[in-house]
Amino acid sequence: DAGITQSPRHKVTETGTPVTLRCHQTENHRYMYWYRQDPGHGLRLIHYSYGVKDTDKGEVSDGYSVSRSKTEDFLLTLESATSSQTSVYFCAIKAAQGTNEKLFFGSGTQLSVL
Amino acid sequence: GNSVTQMEGPVTLSEEAFLTINCTYTATGYPSLFWYVQYPGEGLQLLLKATKADDKGSNKGFEATYRKETTSFHLEKGSVQVSDSAVYFCALSLAGGSYIPTFGRGTSLIVHP
């Protein structure tokens, strides 16, 4: 699993509240990603990071912000949660040995916004 | 831009049947191609990959061949098992710059005993 931990695993919150999801890695990888998974849409990139304090937007970044103040942690914040943000959120890291690159995914966070 | 198109599911098969899940892609460069699998309640994990034309990736009885002329990377397995029931994602990545893989929408496979 490349040492990826997501927390919390499950979260229920109310519309309008801020929510922060955490992704923690133990292997010092440079690239980290946040995806959301929804029926009919597959996997969509929210934000990604290519180093400490280096982040960029993905295809569905509206309503989300991220921070990476240290290599091992990548935080995803829903500034004011909406029902459309009910989803399963996955963190991933890119691991590479030479040209053998691949993504490792966390176990996901099921978020329900009521 | 880059995109991956997979056949829509669910695909429902009986145990020991032959499996094909179609995947085609468009890319602005020369991509590496991947199949990821997601078992119920888990994150995605890499199943197989191919990095150049005519390469065949294989793992756990699954195979896929990188076909540049048809821009395809179809997943096949000769005899599926109930334990293969999962969602399968085709993906591509391009070398250079930021590493941003592009995923298909996923295809659900249901295998009945």
Image (cartoon, coloured by chain):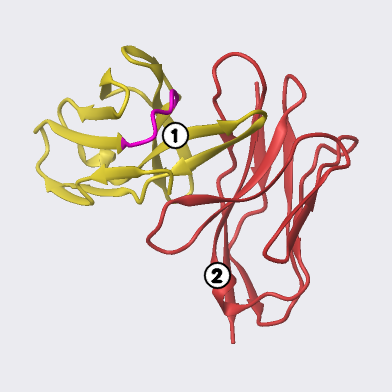
SS at badge 1: strand
Q: Are marks 2 and 1 on the same chain?
A: no
Residue A72 spot, x, y in % from top left: 30, 29
Residue B64 lies, with reference to residue B91, above or below; the image says below
Residue at the image point whose x is 74% and y is 76% from the top? B79
Residue at the image point whose x is 25% and y is 28% from the top? A75
Residue A54 spot, x, y in % from top left: 37, 12
Q: Count every numbered label the image shows and give the total.
A: 2
Is residue A27 found inside the magenta-colored segment of the image? yes
Answer few, some or many: residues within 10 Å of disc 2's Cα (few below 14, many 20 plus, some between 14 and 19).
many
- Residue B100: quarter of image: top right
Give the labeled residue for mark 2.
Answer: B85
Q: Are marks 2 and 1 in contact (CB under 8 Å)?
A: no
Is residue B27 found inside the magenta-colored segment of the image? no
Give the labeled residue for mark 1.
Answer: A93
Q: Amino acid at mark 2?
A: Ser
- Residue B80: quarter of image: bottom right
Q: Which residues are magenta?
A: A25-31
Color of chain B here?
red
Color of chain A here?
yellow
Q: Nearer the viewer, residue B12 or A46?
A: A46
Residue at the image point whose x is 39% and y is 34% from the top? A27
Residue B28 spot, x, y in % from top left: 73, 19
Q: Amino acid at mark 1?
A: Ile
